[in-house]
Image: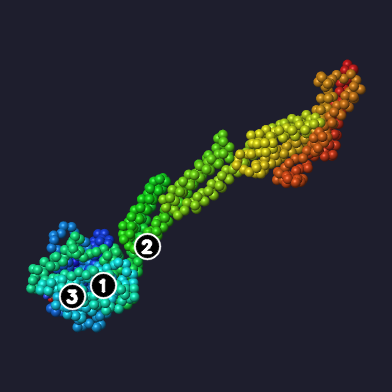
């Protein structure tokens, strides 16, 4: 394990025990140090037999510091495993101006051919791993190895082909890998072209002998690999040329106009750098456990993990500033929605910037979830706002509907106000809905409308109570005075007049509500039947009042008084309303008889309320109004009282008669005495 991870310093990604080094992520962070690399990076692996100068080349080419045999104790093998280094500093022939892309270099340290056997396992696994993560595979070999069927190298290439087929054979998605053959100690006697020709024919041979899965039976080597060849001069014999060759090689990793340029989009695994270590670790785990390595699934798993992580962070940032920012706008809908929009946009932008590079389905799925989480917070805020708004709107409604001074009826006022506040509430709820800040405005609207309905119902009840109270007041005054005035000076048809006045009073008071004969609309937005109920209530009140007035007034003493007044006015005054002067007793007796008869004419009338055509007056009551009465219910369900008409019973009438007689006898005696006085004087 490398001690430090300075820039370009190599770290061991996979050790001799085939363990993945988890801390790699921290090195990545240091290497990248806060830059957003995204997909803008490349991975290169190097393969080749032991001591073929791989690490030496990488260090020169990429300015990395992989261990080389020279740096170690002489001829002692370097530490086995897969080593990783990072560079942005490629050794080039052409002078560079801009800072280069991030390159990650994997140095695969296998074992010597002699020691193979158990290590075939490592070699195969390393090849699988390198192919799963790299774009360019450098195959390093000595010139003199070419043409001789050199078991070691060719076995390695056979492995590479096989594992590549196992990874990409099934889902051929156009992905390719570049095999870059670097021919070392190329002294130049044999031109590169003929070296590459013989290499290609060897490769084709291996490919053709390979047992391929059915799907790829007719696939050619070039369907999966691009091939490039480069020769490097002898490092020790031609050091200057060697150096120049390495620099020219470097150009092909850096300058896109260079032909060939070694990084093509089809080589890239399309995984943002943030997810690379997880991806690499997942791949290694599968390989190490001898499971089928399914690259698309690995990429999905990484995408899932990373998008989740990015979404959580975006959400945490969103929530950390939420209350404060919302707090400044909670009273103002436009502002509130603007702030919500801003918070949402900011959060999604933060998410999109990093997560959109991952597998689209995972990215979109997590994005939806993230939006869903935000909606939860927004819904809470919208609820608060809408509850507040609903309170204010109900207050407005109360004020508008309760305004009896308005020249509009309750029905008109409540309908107008209800529509207006409903519209306002709907508009607000819709705004939250449209912005996607709540999942549905329906539940809010339903709650509000229910509250509104209850409120209007309450106001309507108040209004009805007020109408009844006012009607009662108007009726009370008129009925009491008019009835007593009629009864105090009764004629035979007094009940005709009382009843006519009674009905007229009700009609007068309810005049403004009468639509047509006996058909009332109290303009509180009720059905015909309900209007009729109110009318009945008022009538019952009036009847009750009439009942009380009549029965309170027509007590025995009052009736005696009425009869006596009636007697006296007939007895004491002549037809011209002049006081009589008695001449003799006969005259008095006669007048007495006539006046008495006249007075008693109304005793029956005052004892039993009936119209002049002898029909008993029947009162319409509400049962509750006068519980002590004897009631009966008619076909229409209305209660009637039999007692109303029965004012004085026979015993009471007898008492009245008695008193009346006594009193008029006194009157008559006085009159007679006055004659005696006049005659005597
Ligand atoms: P690795 O095991 O493939 O990584 O090989 P090293 O880079 O550790 O080098 C092994 C030995 O080969 C060292 O002693 C190097 O000095 C030597 N070497 C490196 N490059 C060259 C080269 O281009 N030509 C020759 N002849 N020797 C080289
Ligand atoms: Mg090495």
Looking at the image, is 561 positioned above or below residue 303?
above
Q: Closer to the camera: disc 2 or disc 1?
A: 1
Q: Name the residue under label 2.
A: 361
Residue 346 at least partly seen: yes
Horizontal and vertical percent position of residue 34: 25, 60
Identify the residue position indicated by label 1 in the image. Answer: 221
Residue 1: % across, % down: 22, 73
- Left or right: where 512 falls relative to 398: right
Asked if marks 2 and 3 touch (Cβ < 8 Å), the reply is no
Residue pictured at 23% horizontal, 64% vertical: 263
- Secondary element at tag 1: helix
| Element carrying mark 2 | helix
Among all residues in the image, which is located at the extreme right?
Answer: 586
- Answer few, some or many: residues within 10 Å of disc 2's Cα (few below 14, many 20 plus, some between 14 and 19): few
Q: Check disc 3 and report the residue beneath it.
A: 198
Q: What element carries label 3?
A: helix
Q: Which residue is drawn at 13% across and 63% down?
A: 93
Q: Which badge, 1 or 3, comes first in the chain's sequence?
A: 3
10 Å crowding of disc 3: few (<14), some (14-19), many (20+): some
Relative height, residue 454 to residue 256 (above, below):
above
Quarter of the image for the C terminus: give it.
top right
Quick check: is the Cβ at mark 3 less than 8 Å away from ligand 1? no
For marks 2 and 3 on the same chain, the one whose residue lies earlier in the sequence: 3
Residue drawn where x is 69% and y is 33% of the image? 505
Estimate the spatial distance between the alpha carbons at disc 1 and disc 3, rounded to whole Å: 15 Å
């Amino acid at each position: 394990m490398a001690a430090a991870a300075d820039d370009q310093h190599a770290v061991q990604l996979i050790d001799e025990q085939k363990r993945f080094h988890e801390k790699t992520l921290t090195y990545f962070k240091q290497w990248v140090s806060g830059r957003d690399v995204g997909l803008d990076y490349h991975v290169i692996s190097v393969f080749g037999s032991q001591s073929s100068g791989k690490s030496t080349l990488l260090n020169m080419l990429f300015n990395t510091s992989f261990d080389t045999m020279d740096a170690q104790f002489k001829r002692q093998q370097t530490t086995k495993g897969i080593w990783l280094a990072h560079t942005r500093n490629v050794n080039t022939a052409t002078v560079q101006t801009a800072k280069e892309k991030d390159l990650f270099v994997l140095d695969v340290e296998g074992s010597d051919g002699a020691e193979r056997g158990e290590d075939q396992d490592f070699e195969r696994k390393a090849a699988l791993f390198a192919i799963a993560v790299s774009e360019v595979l450098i195959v390093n070999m000595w010139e003199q190895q070419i043409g001789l069927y050199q078991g070691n190298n060719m076995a390695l290439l056979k492995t590479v082909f096989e594992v590549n087929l196992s990874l990409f054979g099934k889902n051929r998605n156009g992905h390719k890998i570049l095999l870059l053959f670097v021919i070392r100690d190329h002294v130049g006697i044999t031109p590169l072209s003929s070296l590459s020709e013989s290499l290609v024919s060897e490769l084709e041979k291996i490919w053709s002998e390979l047992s391929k899965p059915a799907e790829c039976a007719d696939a050619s080597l070039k369907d999966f690999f691009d091939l490039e060849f480069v020769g490097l001069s002898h490092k020790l014999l031609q050091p200057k040329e060697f150096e120049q060759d390495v620099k020219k090689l470097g150009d092909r990793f850096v300058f896109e106009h260079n032909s060939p340029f070694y990084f093509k989009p089809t080589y890239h695994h399309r995984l943002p750098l943030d997810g690379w270590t997880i991806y690499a670790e997942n791949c290694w785990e599968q390989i190490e456990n001898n499971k089928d390595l399914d690259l698309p699934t690995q990429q999905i798993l990484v995408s899932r993990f990373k998008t989740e992580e990015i979404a959580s962070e975006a959400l945490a940032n969103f929530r950390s500033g939420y209350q404060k920012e919302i707090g400044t706008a909670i009273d103002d809908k436009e502002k509130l929605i603007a702030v919500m929009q801003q918070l949402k946009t900011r959060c999604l932008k933060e998410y999109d910037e990093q997560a959109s590079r991952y597998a689209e389905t995972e990215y979109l799925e997590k994005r939806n979830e993230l939006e869903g989480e935000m909606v939860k917070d927004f819904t809470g805020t919208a609820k608060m706002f809408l509850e507040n708004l609903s309170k204010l709107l109900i207050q407005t409604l109360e004020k508008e509907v309760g305004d009896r001074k308005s020249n509009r009826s309750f029905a008109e006022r409540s309908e107008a106000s209800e529509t207006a506040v409903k519209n306002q509430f709907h508009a607000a709820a819709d705004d939250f809905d449209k912005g996607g800040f709540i999942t549905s405005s329906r539940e809010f609207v339903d709650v509000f409308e229910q509250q509104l309905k209850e409120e209007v119902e309450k106001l309507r009840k108040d209004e009805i109570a007020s109408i009844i109270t006012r009607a009662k007041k108007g009726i009370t005054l008129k009925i009491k005075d008019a009835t007593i005035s009629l009864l105090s000076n009764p004629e035979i048809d007094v009940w005709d007049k009382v009843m006519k006045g009674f009905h007229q009073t009700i009609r007068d008071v309810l005049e403004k509500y009468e639509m047509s004969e006996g058909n009332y609309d109290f303009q509180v937005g009720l059905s015909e039947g309900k209007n009729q109920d109110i009318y009945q209530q008022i009538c019952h009140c009036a009847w009750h009042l009439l009942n009380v007035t009549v029965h309170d007034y027509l007590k025995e003493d009052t009736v005696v008084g009425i009869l006596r007044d009636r007697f006296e006015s007939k007895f004491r005054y002549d037809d011209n309303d002049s006081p009589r002067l008695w001449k003799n007793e006969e005259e008095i007796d006669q007048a007495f008889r006539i006046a008495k008869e006249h007075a008693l004419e109304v005793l029956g009338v005052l004892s039993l309320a009936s119209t002049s055509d002898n029909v008993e007056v029947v009162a319409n009551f509400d049962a509750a109004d006068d519980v002590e009465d004897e009631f009966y219910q008619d076909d229409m369900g209305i209660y009637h009282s039999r007692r109303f008409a029965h004012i004085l019973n026979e015993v009471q009438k007898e008492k009245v008669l008695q008193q009346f007689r006594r009193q008029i006898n006194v009157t008559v005696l006085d009159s007679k005495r006055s004659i005696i006085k006049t005659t005597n004087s």
